Image: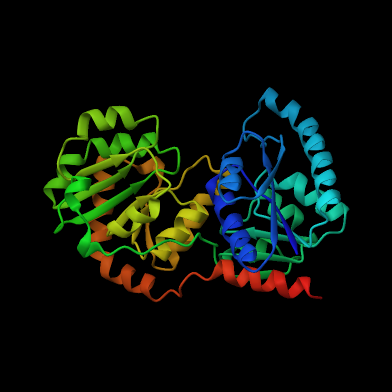
């Protein structure tokens, strides 16, 4: 059996696709990957041994720009390349995870009448998912809130697929290695893979107050801000900062709570590691989907929402105090969630369909 993945752009699109692909691969499937030639998906696909086919498609920008003139031409060339790859591979299933990279691959699958599946982890599904949902065998969702936007689709609530990770024993951690103490609470700050300059800026103004309250920081700064933050705070006890790492699972397990953006993948990881969080959605995210994701988490009692427009040292410290006050309740709600079995559930459904 053969699977073609069409996904790229961000980790939130790529990682769920790879998680499903690895599960299918463990059951004997051959995996092929179509993604952008300069995207992060190329390196990840090759890391896991998937044959990679490069296309060149750009996103639709939310602002008026001359870049839009290139979009139809790049899309058509990418569609033609995807048609060629699908005709060559003859896949039993095509899995797309939304985002602009999925578009030409999904269209090629529809034209060739291949079994098409979509996975979308957001509370408000993306444009590509909404366009192709009705042509898909199934659409795998992480949130019930997404269903009303996909009325003509066969939706299945599975959760957001995650890569498997090894559990660590906190009692055996060498905290000195991280410049941290074993007895303190740890606040994990995540700004997305690129980091968040505004979160970093406000946090810099709160450092002393946070440390004085007995909380230490695990701080993912992003590449741009890392040199300045490292120079200013890197030697200060109680702060462990880094630009980004592929070993984020380690830091999730070292932390007690988090400050985070509200991407679908990050939310799934926070749930998996049972971390109460303050969500600061990225306002420029497509169709404001991060705000909708965060709202859904707050409604479920799994975190606190702080809008970026209201972010300041005072509001951030108030949110941290609120999170501490509500920590036990939020933690209980998180612990009540089932283990993430999304990759296995999606794989089971794709395999069942392929046998028809």
**Residue at x 64%, y 62% (from the top left corner):** 25
Of 227 and 323, nearer the camera is 227
Q: Position of residue 39 (x, y in %)?
A: 60, 37
Pick out the residue farthest to the left.
212
**Residue at x 35%, y 39% (from the top left corner):** 199
Q: How is the image coloured?
A: rainbow
Would you say 304 lies left or right of 217 here?
right
Would you say 79 lies left or right of 40 here?
right
Q: Is residue 224 visible?
A: yes
Q: Quadrant of residue 234?
A: top left
Would you say 120 lies left or right of 296 here?
right
How many numbered markers are drawn? Answer: 0
Of 39 and 291, nearer the camera is 39
**Residue at x 52%, y 39% (from the top left corner):** 284
Pick out the residue farthest to the top.
66
**Residue at x 33%, y 74% (from the top left corner):** 332
Q: Is residue 14 above or below residue 296?
A: above
Q: Is residue 205 above or below residue 294?
A: above
Of 343 and 64, nearer the camera is 343
Q: Position of residue 57 (x, y in %)?
A: 71, 36
Indicate the quadrant containing the C terminus: top left, top right, bottom left or bottom right. bottom right
Q: Position of residue 285 (x, y in %)?
A: 54, 43
Q: Is residue 124 visible?
A: no
Would you say 124 lies left or right of 89 here?
left
Q: Position of residue 177 (x, y in %)?
A: 21, 47
């Amino acid at each position: 059996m053969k699977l073609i993945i069409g996904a790229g752009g961000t980790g939130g699109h790529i990682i769920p696709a790879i998680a499903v692909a690895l599960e299918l691969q463990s059951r004997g499937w051959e995996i092929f990957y179509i993604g952008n030639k300069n995207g992060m998906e190329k390196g990840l696909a090759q890391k896991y041994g998937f044959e990679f086919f490069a296309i060149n498609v750009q996103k639709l920008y939310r602002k008026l720009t001359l870049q839009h003139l290139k979009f139809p031409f790049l899309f058509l060339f990418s569609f033609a390349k995807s048609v060629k790859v699908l005709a060559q591979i003859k896949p039993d299933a095509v899995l797309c995870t939304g985002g602009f990279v999925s578009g030409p691959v999904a269209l090629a699958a529809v034209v060739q009448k291949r079994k098409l599946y979509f996975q979308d982890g957001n509370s408000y599904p993306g444009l590509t998912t909404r366009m192709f949902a009705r042509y898909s065998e199934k659409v795998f969702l992480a949130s019930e809130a997404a269903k009303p936007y996909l009325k003509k689709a066969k939706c299945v609530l599975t959760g957001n697929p995650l890569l498997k990770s090894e559990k660590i024993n906190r009692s055996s951690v060498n905290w000195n290695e991280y410049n941290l103490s074993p007895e303190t609470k740890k606040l994990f700050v995540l700004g997305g893979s690129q980091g968040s300059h505004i979160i970093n800026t406000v946090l810099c103004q709160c450092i002393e107050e946070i440390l004085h309250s007995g909380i230490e920081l695990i701080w993912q700064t992003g590449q741009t801000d890392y040199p300045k933050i490292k120079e200013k705070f890197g030697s200060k006890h109680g702060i462990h900062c880094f630009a980004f790492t592929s070993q984020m699972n380690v830091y999730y397990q070292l932390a007690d709570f988090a400050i985070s953006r509200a991407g679908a993948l990050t939310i799934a990881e926070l749930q998996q590691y049972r971390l109460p969080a303050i969500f600061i959605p990225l306002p420029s995210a497509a169709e404001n989907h991060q705000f909708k994701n965060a709202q859904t988490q707050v409604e479920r009692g799994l975190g606190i929402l702080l809008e970026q427009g209201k972010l300041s040292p005072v509001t951030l410290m108030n949110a941290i105090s609120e999170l501490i006050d509500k920590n036990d309740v939020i933690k209980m709600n998180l612990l009540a969630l089932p283990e993430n079995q999304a990759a296995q559930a999606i794989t089971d459904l794709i395999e069942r369909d392929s046998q028809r």
